[in-house]
Image (tube, grey):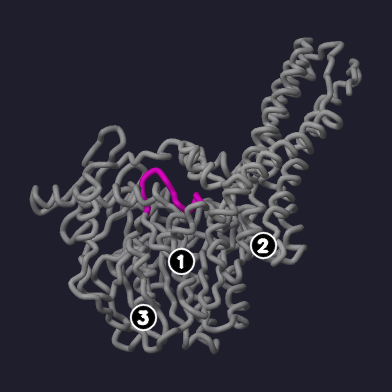
Amino acid sequence: MTFKISKYKEFKIPMYLVKQYIFWILFFAINRIVFYIFNMSESRELEFTEILKSFWHAFYLDTAMASYFLIIPFLILFFQTIFRYGGLNTINRFYTYTIIFIVTIIYVAELGIYSEWKEKISMKAVSFLANPDEVFNTAGTYLLLLGMLLLSLLSGIGIFIYNKIIHTNIVILKKKIWFSIAWFVLMPGIILLGMRGGIKVFPISQGSVYFSKSNYVNLGTVNTVWNLMHSFIKNFKYKNKNPFVYYSFQEAEAVVADMYSVEKDTTIKILNRKQPNIVLIMLESWSANMVAPLGGYPDVTPNFNKLSKDGLLFAKNYSNCSLSHQAIVAIYSSSPSIPEVDIIKHPDKYENLSCFPKKINNYYTYFYYGGNLHHGNIKSYLYFNEFDKIFELPDFPSDAKRGSLGVHDEVLFEKLLEDIDNFKEPFFCGTFTLSSHPPYDFPMEKHFERGESYNEYINSVYYSDRCLGNFFEEAKKQEWYDNTLFILLADHSRSTPQHSNFYEVGNRKTPMLFYGNVLKKEFHGKQYEKYSTQMDIAPTILAQFDIEFKEFKWGKNLFNPYNKNWFCYGFDFGFGVVTPNNYLIYDEKNDIGIYDYKTESEQKKEELLKIGKSFTQVSFQEFLDY
């Protein structure tokens, strides 16, 4: 199929690129249909409309992947507007043939992988190709033959459609420099927007397309090629190699085991009933420097300060991570923050993470956030763990008061109060505030003029605290209140006028409070004086409920008095280790080594260094092995 473009028809060139884009969207849809047919036993268990919805929700990641594929055709067409060279048509055609074949291989390979592992193809799966004999033996003759048949059929269909409907031999009869310049300036921007998923603050991720309580449908919705590409990018540097090997693994594991060992497995019970409701409120970027009982400003969080007088305040709570998506898995799965990688960005590893609300029998689980949960892949993690209801920005009314990232905290808490009255009990509800996140566009006049460059942040925390106070004022009037444990804690800290460097121990200090009438009287207004982190939430709550928690091994049951008093945190390419009166910060990058420390002796310094190195080595290896 050939047409010539005269000096009046240059704009058929961008239309050709549009046709190629439509082709890829169609080809991805065809392969998605094959996925649902191939796994018919699972497809039958769902409403047909649920599967149909997946094609709509898949559009965003399909567009992102198609945009990547359009980079080479764009360059070819661009040069064809400058140089009259017909050979570029052939290059374009065979480039597309090659991509069709590669895409088909990936989709067909995923059919076998999903049948075996119930997950999408990833770097982990591809690594098994290093042992082809094992692959062939595992697959069996039937699957191999079926795979070859599908590869031939699907790639053949793709090439046929492309040749008959899409491909065009472009011939430029008259060069138009103005057109070439406009083409080169405008089209890359459009392609880039497609690649990142539009003009939103955060680029697109797997979680952007999750919509169903069925993990099967969500996996079918995620673009397979995009998922594999993302997995390669995230894993390539450390795909099979642990960069933090300091000792033999037997020695490193022994050090870690010793730090987590307890003389006696026991629990001090702090609740006056067995299974209360739980409302866990994660406070965006709250630093202990904003909270008076923790040594911070006296007037920035007056409502939290008031609550702490009647709750159980953790006086030495520290964040083991520096990003929200790291905090989610730390809180819910006791997963440590390790340098360079984030396990939440690897859905193929989720099955190795337990989620503590899921372990509490007969609880209905909810999660509320005022923004978009696809950031950091939080959404995919929550859907994988089968929360009964996930409420985020698109679910709020279009006229709700919002800033650049989502609805303000007052809207979030108002919606939460409205919905909790209809929750089935017992329930677990995770909530994540937003207004104290940059760009701090909260709907309130500034209350303070302090902190210089931190002034916006300080005022945002004051606003968030005001919303928190209003929430509790109304919550106390509700029937469910007396049977509810409230857990308030920050996802992470941030730089403040008192601490500017994210790796400093003081910078990691964050508020955490247990609150509610379900606390025994003797714990009201008390402070917990040993070290705690987000990773300790899961084992601590499960121990209170008499539920076994050995899979949450990186956390501690805070109310076992025999726990060792220490914690470790990770950052970029290093770690910090803290014990009473001692700390050490180690940075592997640029051969810095020990960045800072304060220890009682040289022996203690070496001891902390070995603990931190062993913790990092073992936790990173666990990540690789998942």
Query: Mark 1 or mark 2: which is in front?
Result: 2
Location of residue 162 (image quadrant): top right
Location of residue 581 (image quadrant): bottom left
Residue 445, percent across and down? Answer: 54, 61
Q: Secondary structure at mark 1?
A: loop
Q: Which residue, given by chain and number where applicable, does mark 2 sit on?
A: 42
The answer, for residue 338, to whether it is visible in the render is yes
Residue 496, percent across and down? Answer: 36, 53
Q: Secondary structure at mark 2?
A: helix
Q: Which residue, given by chain and number where applicable, does mark 3 sit on?
A: 546
Location of residue 372 (image quadrant): bottom right
Between discs 2 and 3, the one toward the N terminus: 2
Type of amino acid at the residue the image marks with label 2: Glu
Work out whether residue 24 or residue 175 is closer to the camera in this orientation and state it. 24
Q: Which residues are magenta?
A: 337-346
Q: What count of labels does the image hold?
A: 3
Residue 594: mark in rendering: none
Between discs 3 and 1, the one toward the N terminus: 1
Type of amino acid at the residue the image marks with label 1: Cys
Q: Which residue, given by chain and number where applicable, does mark 1 sit on?
A: 355
Q: Quadrant of the N terminus?
A: top right
Query: CA–CA distance between discs 1 and 2?
Result: 24 Å
Q: Secondary structure at mark 3?
A: loop
